[in-house]
Image (cartoon, grey):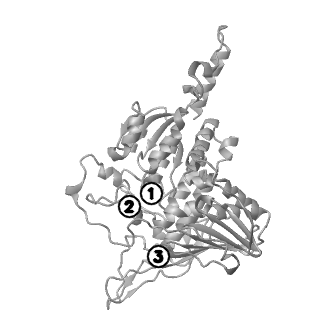
Amino acid sequence: MKNNNSRRDFIKKSAILGTGFYIVPRNVLGGPGFTAPSDQLAIAGIGAGGKGASDLRNAYNGGKNRVVAICDIDPKQAAANVKAHPDAAYFADYRELLDKVKGIDAVTVGTPDHTHAPIAYNAMMRGMHVYVQKPLTHTLAEARLLTKTAASQKVVTQMGNQGGSNPGVVKIMEWVDQKRIGTIKHVHVWTNRPVWPQGIKMPASAPDQKPSDLAWDLWLGPAKKIPFTPNLHPFNWRGFWEYGTGALGDMGCHLFDAPYKALKLGYPSAVQCSVADVYTRMWVPEYTPEACPLATRVTIDFPKDDHNPQGVVFEWTDGGIQPAIPDEIADKYVADSSGVMMMGENGIITADTYGNHPRLYIGGQEVDHLNTDEAGNLDLIHNQNWTEACKAGFGSAQHQALTSSFDYAGPFTETVLMGNLAIKAHQMRREDAQGNQSYFGRKKLYWDGANMKITNLDEVNQFVSKTYRAGFELPI
């Protein structure tokens, strides 16, 4: 971005130091809303369908920036953005895009979870700003790497948990800072996800069903090489550990955000879980360690600190399982399909997804409520804040005002993925010589956040990172 800032400065100085020509206002030259090319970011969109499509559209922002390159392994998914930006170079392989297209300022990453980190890391190492969909990464080690890389490369970053730019989150932070409900020791978070197939065996491969224009090997990216498997792309990959992060990865970064920020939390100290079993025959549960479970209950402990003298426990439930509603608000509060309930010594704070409609209850009465219906297009606002911060530069006021730059989003994502660490431990089993199986990971796991390590069951640490296929490696 230094080069592009220099380019803009040069153009402006050239106009000022010119040979006496009258400088015509830009709005006269280009019309209302016109943005000069020198004030536009050159954007590349990697992942141009699904959520990636809206991220790229938001970064373009009606012409405030330029889309110079588009990458997607599926031209059908990318078709709308390709049509909207006919001058943009098109690639199936993000590595080729990053190598060949010069002058890219910023990149949006809207691909399956397992490819977020390799793409973002390679872009940042080239000095490009990045906007990465939630969850930021597939593993905890990747989150730590991206946090460090963003700082060392001095690039402007944002994770795509758009609720972070919701005024509802600010209101919750205000209530907590004012100690309106006193000390908060317990936070309930829940979701109706998964809304895709989950808790089932991996679909069977069917190479003959692969669409001719789908770059399957590039879709796999860092994952192990397998023949084309239907019903994974473009959405159902979420339910399998090789590619997705399950319900927690999908919704945790939206739902944990408000309480995590408001309580000024850091690394957790422990995690444990229980998981719903699926029975298709008497007494014998299905065993599908490759799949995220049908439903889970995860508790994440945070240690005592200056902000939380008694520590805090987050209790997460998915699969449509909701917490019990306390008697004092039972006739006033109706739980949404996903939501948050913060339990204080003097009251309760609730919120819907993205920090929408925060409500403050004291003595069983609703004493405050922020109506967020007019909050605007959070997707656009969250993304626009990032593009404007990219123009302002690393360390600028606009950069520091971002609500999910990687200095925050990295450690926050590690917290969310801690739950998946416990779930994967829950699925581990050993078999003895007699054929008896023991699920040895079903225990409370203690976490050393600074060193990124489970301290009481070393076998679980295999899930902190993962193995990368050749050509997609990361320095982890």
Mark closer to the chain start, 1 or 3: 1
Foreground mark, 1 or 2, reads 2
> Tag on residue 425?
3
* Residue 446 position (above or below residue 8): below
Distance (Cα) linking label 2 and label 3: 21 Å
Q: Amino acid at mark 1?
A: Asp
> In this figure, which residue is indicated by the disc labeled 1?
113
Say which quarter of the image contains residue 113: bottom left
Dots 1 and 2: beta carbons under 8 Å?
yes
Foreground mark, 2 or 3, reads 2
Residue 207, image x, y percentages: 22, 57
Q: Amino acid at mark 3?
A: Ala
Q: Amino acid at mark 2?
A: Trp
- Does any portion of residue 474 appear in the rendered image? no
Quarter of the picture containing the N terminus is: top right
Mark closer to the chain start, 2 or 3: 2
